[in-house]
Amino acid sequence: MTQRSRYLGVAVGLGGVAFAQEAGVDPATTAWMLISTALVLLMTPGLAFFYGGLVRAKNVLNTMMMSFAALGAVGMSWVLVGYSLAYDTGSAFIGGFGHLLLRGLGLEGEGIPPLLDVAFQGTFAIIAAALISGGIVERMRFGAYLAFITLWSLTVYAPLAHWVWGGGWLAEALDFAGGTVVHINAGVAALVAALVVGPRKDHGRQAILPHNVPFVLLGAALLWFGWFGFNGGSAYAADGTAALAFTNTFLAPAATLVVWGALDGWRAGRITAVGAATAIVVGLVAVTPAAGFVGPLGALWIGALAAFPSYLFILWRARSRMDDALDVFGTHGLGGITGALLTGVLASAEWGGTPGLLEGNAAQLWLQAQAVLYAVGYSAAATFVLLRLVGAFTPLRASAKEEGVGLDVNAHGEEAYTTGEGAVLLLDVEGQPQRLSAGGRA
């Protein structure tokens, strides 16, 4: 049972072990969780920069807006309905409606106010949905995307969160901060969405290059910064477990970065900036399920080993007809799968309380494998159904003309980069507007 499950057992009546030794809200824990919530919220704008830098200039605003819009669409759906479906008392498969519209969630609780937990959990739901956009950038209609991620957060994310963290049927699987619930789930959904929507019209016919690599590095930096709240906050206390998760969040990406750089140098003779940014994210993803269950050396092993499957898959994907545009599955899906399985191998009774395969508990690896398989299967099937449902009411894909011009202008009426200072409007002799260009010509 995770630290998150122990807190929820008291705060929202799911049953379990008390999180705090003394009844009532703990100021130190609350302060840490306030900071963690803000850190995780920052990750979604960070993702916007990471994704925005990877696409072409004509689509950067649309790509970034897919992340920013999730703050509103998923944030609202989570607060009003999703949190209750994930964490209210219910069956082994789904929560109930006891906390619908925030009913019963106030300021009195154990450890932290329950209302703060709604916000903290909401930041996880938001970035999980936003991650999916990387699979379908530069060709999916913005309205259809918003409808899809709103429904996805309620029918895919919330049930899976209940299975693993809310007292559901996968509660024995170790997932400290979202390797299964967030990353495998979103990575698989992005892959399915990419296949359903179809490849970009230029995919495989011309090189599609990142338009702003410094944006990618900035996004990776913001993601790493926010991830300390993502993993450290999932301890639900300002204690040694939080310190362990915090330290592992520092170590694992460092190891991935070294191994990824070595692979890049061996294969191509140079280390790319986009590769370095991708490596950081892969390491963060891989250590997420294990952050509070393995020691620092275990985190280094997870980070180092996670580099190989993601690196090789991304190389293969680039040569294939599959247009998971920003490699969400290769980064988050495979990184999450690798991390979840290695958690079952490297989990330590000394550090996290639960032994893994290396300490003689082979059953834990089997539990991890089951959780991975069920998460992959449910996310893939449910995402496919949702996309077909949304597609029955509105086109999922932009037209070839819109895609050629770019989705910034078509979806938002704006451009990220303009030349000149716009047009000058003068009235002609009949009082009608006459448009002059910035150079003075009509």
Image (spheres, rainbow, N blue to C red):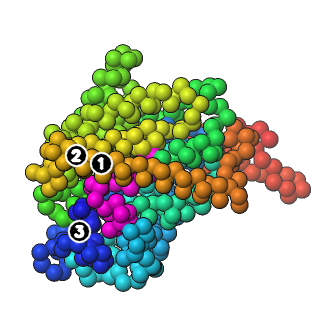
Of residues 117 and 56, which is closer to you in this image? 117
Instruction: Say whether marks 3 and 1 touch (CB < 8 Å).
Output: no
Q: Determine whether, in the image, residue 270 is placed left or right of residue 410.
A: left
Instruction: Specify the label residue 366 is tagged with.
Output: 1
Residue at image point 59% right, 42% down: 195
Q: Amino acid at mark 1?
A: Trp
**Residue that badge 3 annotates:** 6
Which mark is first along the chain, 1 or 3? 3
Q: Nearer the viewer, residue 229 or 219?
A: 229
Percent position of residue 354, x then y: 17, 54
Position of residue 375 measured from the top left corner of the image (x, y, whole percent):
42, 53
Give the spatial CA distance, label 2 vs label 3. 24 Å
311 lies above or below 195: above
Which range is magenta?
162-187
x, y percentage for residue 2? 24, 61
Q: Amino acid at mark 2?
A: Ala
Say which residue label 2 marks: 362
User: Within 10 angstroms of label 3, few (less than 14), some, or many (20 or more) residues?
Assistant: many
On whether residue 5 falls in the magenta region, the answer is no
Mark 2 and mark 3 lie on one chain; the one further toward the N terminus is 3
